[in-house]
Image (cartoon, rainbow, N blue to C red):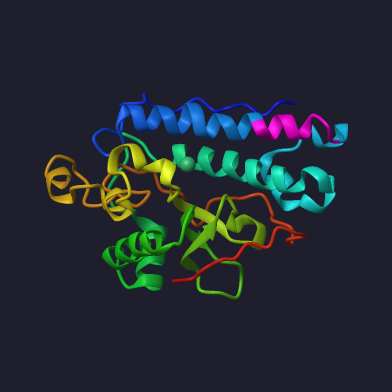
Amino acid sequence: MKHLLPVLPYSASALEPHIDARAMSVHHDMHHAAYVKALNEALASAPESLHDKSPEWLLLNLAKVPENIRTTVRNNAGGHLNHSLFWRSMSPDGGGAPSGALADAIDQAFGSFEALKTRFDKAGAEHFRSGWVWLVKAPHGHATLQVLTTPGHDTPLTQGYVPLLLNDVWDHAYYLKQENRRPDYLSGGGRSSIGTKLPVAWSAPGTPRKCQWSSPDEKHVPIPPPITARSKLRFP
Ligand SMILES: [Fe+2]
């Protein structure tokens, strides 16, 4: 099975002005596509038993991946998985604050939805170099919801955290529009002008673009203990 670049669930211009069509196209058609291509090329030399494995499985079972392609698989399966989640976390028809169990969990963990927004954007802005900022459901025994960052394309899945929301803080996510101004990208690059045009005060990942929320009660595939690929999770 070859890994495939998922089709964007909306047009490249659907999230303008927050993400313009060119930035979206370059990000999806070039950067994400490159991760998929590199993953397939690496796996071509791997045992056949690995050919039908999902990116999640590969990341959770890196010890079973031949050592000579392990780093390549880690980086590119991570890039493929994270971007696939990222596209699906946004929608031109989504947006607004969550409700129900998720809203209650946010209030309990952060005090308010506004406090979560501030914390999420700040964590993304302060993350050094490339990586991702996440809202996660923590493993049993920890606070239910947490904000954390990961370097490169590492995913908190490998340590038992369930991603609910993510934002890409690699330069390639914003350099075409916001250049080196990551905080502008995270805050939507003009919250006041955007906020008056959209019925959302904040939508994720991390900006006033519209989002789709995952539920902390969503059923997920049981996650085995991590074997390798310990990521340097950072809790701001
Ligand atoms: Fe990206």
Q: Is residue 34 left or right of residue 47?
A: left
Q: Mark yes or no: residue 65 visible.
A: no
Q: Mark yes or no: residue 132 visible.
A: yes
Which residue lies at the image location 75% right of the left edge and 26% below the top edge?
1
Q: Position of residue 229 (x, y in %)?
A: 70, 58
Which residue lies at the image location 64% right of the left edge and 46% below the top edge?
75
Q: Is residue 53 left or right of residue 24?
A: right
- Dominant secondary structure of the magenta stretch? helix
**Quarter of the figure with residue 43:** top right
Q: Is residue 146 left or right of residue 46?
A: left
**Quarter of the figure with residue 133:** bottom left
Q: Position of residue 226 (x, y in %)?
A: 73, 61
Which residue lies at the image location 38% right of the left edge and 65% below the top edge?
106
Magenta-span inclusion, residue 50? no
Q: Position of residue 56 (x, y in %)?
A: 67, 45
Which residue lies at the image location 37% right of the left edge and 57% below the top edge?
100
Magenta-span inclusion, residue 44? yes
- Span colored in magenta: 38-46
Relative vertical location of residue 195 with respect to residue 16 in this rendering, above or below: below
Relative vertical location of residue 33 with respect to residue 216 in this rendering, above or below: above
